[in-house]
Image: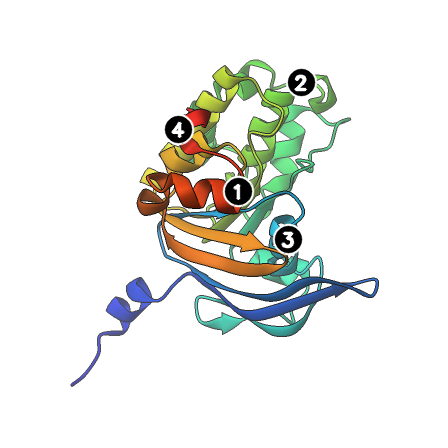
């Protein structure tokens, strides 16, 4: 029986990690991470502090090199590529430190993030609809923005060009509830555009609102993978694996 290649592409996960190990300065940071990121879904990477979530994102992006295991994007192994070549394959990253240029204006930050096309037209209009504050402060140095506005700019920089997969590291960290709600709405808009997202997030209300798929890590390893909807109603596992409760975080 013949298989339709287009159907296969839709079924195949966007990203797959298999037995990934990462060593940094002689320390084993990741010790067997395996999970998949389904296409056109939001996958939440959860776990207690220090279990390797950020290290996993950095390894996927090639900022740290995997010592063992495979990382496949759209079926192609990328673990041996450098960060620039990984980004060129459509994988964009919003780090925990946001990665914006404080001395440049909002507009200049977006302009230098736009590598293959001019900063204008429908894509820019769409991004500014997601984050209206960036239009208001277009000529301001990015270093003068509030924490929430800087996070909006960091995300806008990552999506000013369409990407296959967006990695985001703790976007709500240190932000006020009203700003978190604005970020949730922006990510919901990205989700409606069928952007595939892998997100590290400690705010469980945000994780529940956005997440379709779930990966839980512990001590540099994958502990659990499944549906966010199932985990959201399992207070026992929430307490055991995260020391938190989604009910308490709403």
Identify the residue position indicated by label 2 in the image: 145
The disc, 4 or 2, on the residue closer to the chain's N-terminal end is 2
CA gap, disc 1 and disc 2: 32 Å
Kind of element beneath mark 1:
helix
In this picture, residue 59 sits left or right of residue 167: right
The mark total stands at 4
Foreground label between 3 and 4: 4
Residue reaching furthest to the left: 1
Q: CB under 8 Å between callouts 3 and 1?
A: no
Q: Position of residue 16 (x, y in %)?
A: 47, 65
Residue, disc 3: 52
- Residue situated in front as seen by the camera: 220 or 241: 241
Q: Earlier in the sequence, mark 3 or mark 1?
A: 3
Question: Which residue is denoted by mark 1 in the rendering?
Answer: 242
Q: Which residue is mark 4?
A: 247
Looking at the image, is mark 3 or mark 2 earlier in the sequence? 3
Which element type, helix, strand or loop, lies under badge 4? helix
**Residue 199 visible, this angle:** no
Q: Position of residue 109 (x, y in %)?
A: 66, 32
């Amino acid at each position: 029986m013949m298989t339709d290649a287009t159907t296969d592409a839709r079924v195949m996960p966007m990203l797959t990690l298999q037995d990934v190990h990462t060593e940094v300065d002689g320390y084993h940071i990741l010790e067997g991470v395996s999970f998949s990121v389904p296409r056109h879904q939001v996958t939440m990477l959860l776990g207690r502090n220090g279990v390797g979530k950020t290290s996993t994102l950095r390894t996927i992006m090639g900022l740290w090199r995997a010592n063992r295991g495979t990382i496949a994007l759209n079926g192609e192994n990328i673990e041996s590529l450098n960060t620039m070549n990984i980004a060129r394959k459509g994988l964009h990253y919003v780090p925990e430190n946001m990665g914006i240029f404080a001395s440049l204006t909002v507009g200049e930050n977006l302009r230098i993030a736009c590598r293959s096309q001019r900063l204008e037209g429908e894509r820019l209009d769409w991004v500014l609809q997601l984050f209206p504050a960036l239009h208001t402060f277009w000529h301001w140095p990015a270093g003068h923005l509030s924490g929430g506005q800087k996070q909006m700019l960091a995300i806008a920089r990552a999506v000013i060009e369409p990407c296959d997969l967006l990695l985001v590291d703790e976007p709500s960290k240190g932000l006020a509830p009203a700003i978190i709600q604005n970020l949730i709405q922006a990510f919901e808009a990205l989700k409606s555009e069928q952007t595939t997202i892998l997100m590290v997030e400690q705010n469980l209300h945000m994780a529940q609102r956005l997440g379709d798929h779930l990966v839980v890590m512990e001590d540099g390893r994958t502990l659990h993978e499944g549906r966010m909807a199932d985990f959201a109603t399992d207070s026992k596992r929430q307490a055991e694996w995260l020391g938190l409760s989604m009910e308490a975080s709403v």
